[in-house]
Amino acid sequence: MSTNSKIKSLLFKVLAVLVLVGVGLYAGINYTIENVLESQEEALMTDRLSSDIQYLQDIIGDGDWFIDEEGYLCRGDVRLGNGTDKTANIAPFLELEGKTQTFSYVCKLTEDKDLKWVGDKKTGYQQGPYIRIAGSTKDADGNSIVGTYMDKKVTDILDREGHYEGAANVSGRPIFCVYQNLLNKDGKVVGCVAVGRSVEELSEEAGRYEGYIDWALLFLILLASVAVLLYFKRTSDTIVNIKKYLDRIGKGDFPEEPLKGKRNDELGLVINSINVMKKSLMEKERMGSELNVATNIQAGMLPSSFPAFPEREDFDVYATMNPAKEVGGDFYDFFMVDEDHLAIVIGDVSGKGVPAALFMVIAKTLIKNYAMMGLEPSEIFETVNNALCEGNEQDIFVTAWMAVVDLKTGQVKYVNAGHNPPLIKLGDSFSYIEQKPGLVLAAFENFKYKQGQFTIQPGDRIYLYTDGVTEATDKGGNLYGEDRLIEFINSRADAPIERVLHGIRRDIDDFVGEAEQFDDITMLLFDLTKKTKGKRLELDATLDSMGRVMDFIDTELDRLGANMKAKAQIDIAVDELYSNMARYAYGDQVGKVIISMSSEGKNVRIKFINSGEPFNPLEKEDPDVSLGLEDRDIGGLGIFISKNIMDKMEYEYLDGYNVITVEKNIE
């Protein structure tokens, strides 16, 4: 069967899969949206009631809120009341209720200190300093509530946050209330406004939104299915054209016209690289140009921007590739299949130079394309294997390992095509996956790959590598080996993932010494982040960045609820430690500093990491504070103060990094 026939057959299969997947997606996503809307019903209520508050204030009129000399709460020229039914101006509230069915009232802030319980402490409530002065809302018996005090639990939240949302019962009907402070022209609280609407009515409104979303979802799924089908056909046509063009070049026939194809994806990079390769070959600089083209192809195809998914806090991934002088076909990849599934891939193409690099591009592109169709890992490799076998006249093959990680459940489905066994950390240490690898890709058609699976928890990791790691050789012919690899990675099992990979590379260099690197060294480390993952800031180590550092620290301390004393002490220590690094860590150069924050309960841990010259500030002798200023040696006082106001301060030099850790209880 020809390439075109196979692609057409596959196209019909893709269409059938899209129909089935579309139906399943519609049912699953529609069910999810219904649950989300139900959970977001309160937010919809709050938004609607917030607009009703603004409408009420527009009805009352313009001007500042204030309490006049006779104790009336006023807005501009309008008096609303001072706490009795006789003085209550209820017209604006009745107008609001008549037009929007929204209950409402306003309260003024009093200086009454003689507040008490209403009812007993089981069924009643404790009064707060807000008294109701006017409104349309009545109690459950239909009586006016003007002159009564608000619940202290609500007023406490108003005092602290300026607003409050919550359910209430008025006249025997469940309503949802929103409270908002009223401020005078000086920004001081003079009272509050409260509005409420029927929970049933707002639920019906949410149901109408659900209907609109159903139609929009159906349209989007149909549109996405058509787009995927068109993209697959366009990709298939492009691959056929690339193959024909390469066949001509392989026979020594260099077309005068460049390979055409306007694409902004991986295949676009392939087309550009092939055109560069052809031009280089035609200029009779084949050997040097081939290595350059192969290097560009290899480097351009690998994701290199880290952190790779800065918006996600539930996982992290980091990868490195160090090519040998004679460029091979190592590759790695990671990409989101959907919102909850991440694919990680590593591979090694046999051979060197441009043929290996181009074969790598095609293999990597096919793996990603079929993964995005939602196939199982074993099905992906079976389909890719058949595609690579066709027309493989140079007998190139690929070893590869791939997994799809369910980020919600931790389930990992994987498949191995003749690749090195990955190391997985399930708990405290790494160990090799015990599975017999399948046949390499592009060797024989119709091979059935066995799929394995395991489950990981937050804090677990998956380490992928190519044989350039374990087969790195010193001058005596000794291999770096699997035993040394697992021993080293277990000594850094919980270190930041980028430090783990850089540490392994540094250890390989120390082992190899002056021996030449004959193979690419490629590694990828995936971390299912613990739920207590902290925040991280990376920036140039300059004094100009001090503002960013303090904003980062103070924002996180405020989020964690640090008390003022602990916050001030941490600020002092951070200022001292960062300014020292900015001034001295890199001499006259500008390097990077990484600052990370994490917490366990009320204990905050802050790490400062730089790759400057090794320097332990804690080794400096403490100054004699009993001496006068004129008798003391210059320097050292800031570190001394930091050590004394922090609960803990430590230093270590690890894998080429200075790491200073401080801890403080912020309760």
Image: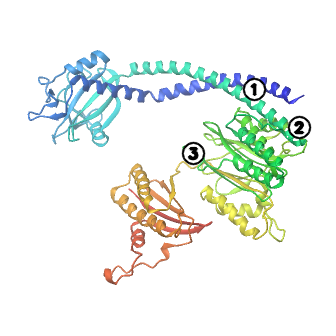
In the current view of this chain or complex, which residue is farthest to the left? 70
Rounded to the nearest angstrom, the CA distance separating label 3 from label 1 is 32 Å
Q: Indicate whether 21 appears above or below 156.
A: above
Q: What amino acid is at disc 1?
A: Val
Which picture quadrant has residue 483?
bottom right
Q: In this view of the protein, can residue 390 be seen by the observer?
A: yes
Depth order, front residue of 598/19: 19
User: How many neighbours does mark 1 have within 10 angstroms: few (below 14), some (14-19), or many (20 or more)?
Assistant: some
In the current view of this chain or complex, which residue is farthest to the bottom? 631
In the rendered image, which quarter contains the C terminus?
Answer: bottom left
Q: What amino acid is at disc 3?
A: Asp
Depth order, front residue of 47/475: 475
Which picture quadrant has residue 245?
top right
Q: Give how far across and how far down residue 477 sits, in percent.
A: 84, 68
Q: In this view of the protein, can residue 176 be seen by the observer?
A: no
User: How many neighbours does mark 2 have within 10 angstroms: few (below 14), some (14-19), or many (20 or more)?
Assistant: few
Q: Give how far across and how far down residue 351 sits, in percent.
A: 85, 51
Please tell me the numbered disc located at residue 94: none
Please tell me the numbered disc located at residue 391: 2
Q: What amino acid is at disc 2?
A: Gly
Rounded to the nearest angstrom, the CA distance separating label 2 from label 1 is 23 Å
Rounded to the nearest angstrom, the CA distance separating label 3 from label 2 is 42 Å
User: How many neighbours does mark 3 have within 10 angstroms: few (below 14), some (14-19), or many (20 or more)?
Assistant: some
Q: Secondary structure at mark 2?
A: loop
Disc 1 marks which residue? 14
Disc 3 marks which residue? 314
Residue 442 shown left or right of residue 659 in the figure: right
